[in-house]
Image (cartoon, grey):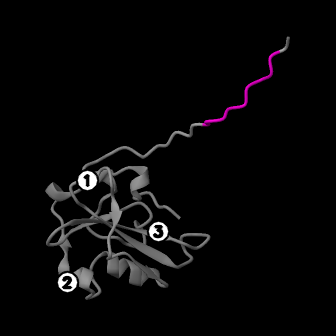
Amino acid sequence: MCTAPHPVYGISHVRITDKLTRENWLQKAVVRQGPTSIYYTYILYAGATPEEGPWMVEVNGNDVNWEYFPRIDDFSREFADLDDALRYANAEDGSFFAESTVPAERLYWPQERPPESHTVIDFNPRRPKKNE
């Protein structure tokens, strides 16, 4: 399920923190910096409730078109244990993600943006019959 920091709900600096915890992961994201990209990182859950796994650490890479075309980078991973997902997202597990990124300074955080919205257009609308 999508959690509050998912980009579909917009990007807000209020929802960015230094570290994800069991208390804040549903509401917060972290931002890490690698040699070629900025990584906006948050956790989703696939169970019926946030307490049920698996949990997916989504790592969205930043490029020139970040605000228009966010992409999920190769660093995204699924975990059966929430604590493992938190350690990975916080780069505290010795993984390649942990070794190749550092916490990003606020200057490099993605720009804030509003939630995404979509308009559904019916190309074949039903029209009421005219009475003659």
* Quadrant that contains the C terminus: top right
Residue shown at 56% from the left, 40% from the top: 120
* Of callouts 1 and 3, the N-terminal one: 3
> In the rendered structure, which segment of residues is drawn in magenta?
122-130
Name the image quarter holding residue 123: top right
- Of residue 39 and residue 29, the one placed in the foreground of this image is 39
Q: Say which amino acid is labelled 1.
A: Asn
Is 101 rendered above or below residue 5?
below
- Left-right relation of 112 to 86: left
User: What secondary structure is the magenta-colored segment mainly?
Assistant: loop
Name the image quarter holding residue 95: bottom left
Is 98 rendered above or below residue 25?
below
Q: Say which amino acid is labelled 3.
A: Leu
The location of residue 87, given as percent across then percent down, is: 34, 81
Q: Say which amino acid is labelled 2.
A: Glu
* Of callouts 2 and 1, the N-terminal one: 1
Q: Which residue is mark 1?
A: 65
Residue shown at 47% from the left, 61% from the top: 3
Quick one: which residue is furthest to the bottom in this view? 94
Q: Is residue 5 magenta?
A: no
- Left-right relation of 77 to 31: right
Q: Which residue is mark 3?
A: 44
The location of residue 72, given as percent across then percent down, is: 36, 67
- Left-right relation of 99 to 90: left
Q: Which residue is mark 2?
A: 99
Number of other residues with Cα within 10 Å of mark 2, as a class: few under 14, some 14 to 19, many 20 or more: few
**Which secondary structure, mark 2?**
helix
Number of other residues with Cα within 10 Å of mark 3, as a class: few under 14, some 14 to 19, many 20 or more: many
The location of residue 40, given as percent across then percent down, is: 30, 64
